[in-house]
Amino acid sequence: MTITIKFFALGRELVGKSELQKSYDESVTVGKVLEDLRAEYPRLAQMPSMLLAVNMEYSGEDTVLKDGDELAIIPPVSGG
Amino acid sequence: MIEITPDPIDVQKVMDAAFSPDCGGVVVFIGTVRNFSRGKDILRLEYDAYPEMAIKMLERIVDEIKGKWDIRKVAISHRTGVLKIGEIAVVIALSAPHRKDAFAACQYCIDRLKEIVPIWKKEVAIDGETWIDDHA
């Protein structure tokens, strides 16, 4: 299964891209994907805190991802 | 009307989307780019957004508002990209039969926007740039 991961603002700058795809052989939690991202992009540790969204809904690390899901790394928001 | 736009916001258009014949008033909030922040002189702001989710969250805030107050129409426009000092970053207009509801709901709307809507601003000052964390 393949999932899309989106980065914005500080996250996009730290990772150096706005989007990437990851494939897994079996179902995977948001927390596991995050662990893999942190290993691959150590600069993510510079983000003071983050929220996560799956298919545009705020979501926890224990959410199980399905094929085609979109995971977004949401830095602290500051609109307005 | 809810939009995330890279173009300058037409305030009149947002207000027009909120007017309603059964209402006695429209409250409008216009957020602009200030020239100072946290003791620094600001040159410009750069806004980034996750537009599809931002619209979804703004729609949720509108539902929340309509559950709390007697509000008839809500219009919200938020800009993205590079904004100069004094430019308009966000416009909220909402109408209600009675003004108290409209004032309270408008305050709630901008407060919630800053809490849950995936939009980010980077302050560019003379001595560097910072992504703002209002919640730190």
Image (cartoon, coloured by chain):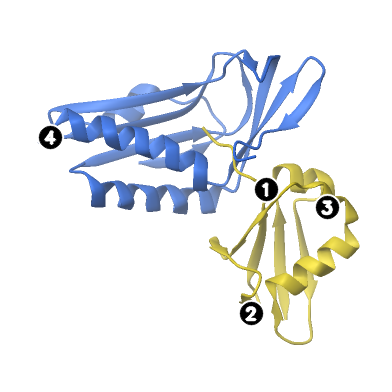
Chain colours: A yellow, B blue
Q: Label 3: how many residues lie within 10 Å, few (<14), some (14-19) or many (20+)? A: few
Chain of the residue on which disc 2 is drawn:
A
Q: Nearer the viewer, residue B50 or B66?
A: B66
Query: Which numbered disc, 2 or 1, marks the residue that appears first in the sequence?
Result: 2
User: Circle 3 — which element?
Assistant: helix
Quarter of the picture containing the N terminus of chain B is top left
Between A46 and A11, the one nearer to me in the picture: A46
Q: Residue at x 44, y 43 (%)?
A: B112
Q: Residues within 10 Å of mark 4 (few under 14, many from 20)?
A: some
Q: Which residue is mark 3?
A: A45
Which residue is farthest left? B22
Do marks 4 and 2 share a chain? Answer: no
Q: Secondary structure at mark 4?
A: loop
Cα–Cα gap, marks 2 and 1: 23 Å
Instruction: Note whether B76 is above or below B42 in the view shown.
Output: below
- Local SS, label 2: loop
Look at the numbered disc 1 and give the secondary structure of its residue.
loop
Give the residue type at disc 1.
Answer: Pro
**Circle 2 sits on which residue?**
A66
- In the figure, is residue B54 to the left or right of B30? right
Residue marked by disc 4: B97
Q: From the viewer's perspective, is the residue at label 3 or at label 2 nearer?
A: 3
Q: Position of residue B50 (x, y in %)?
A: 59, 48
Label 4 resides on the chain identified as B
| A48 to the left or right of B136 | right
> CA–CA distance between discs 1 and 3?
12 Å
Q: Residue at x 80, y 43 (%)?
A: A13
Determine whether label 1 and label 3 are within 8 Å by CB.
Answer: no
**Which residue carries the number 1 mark?**
A75
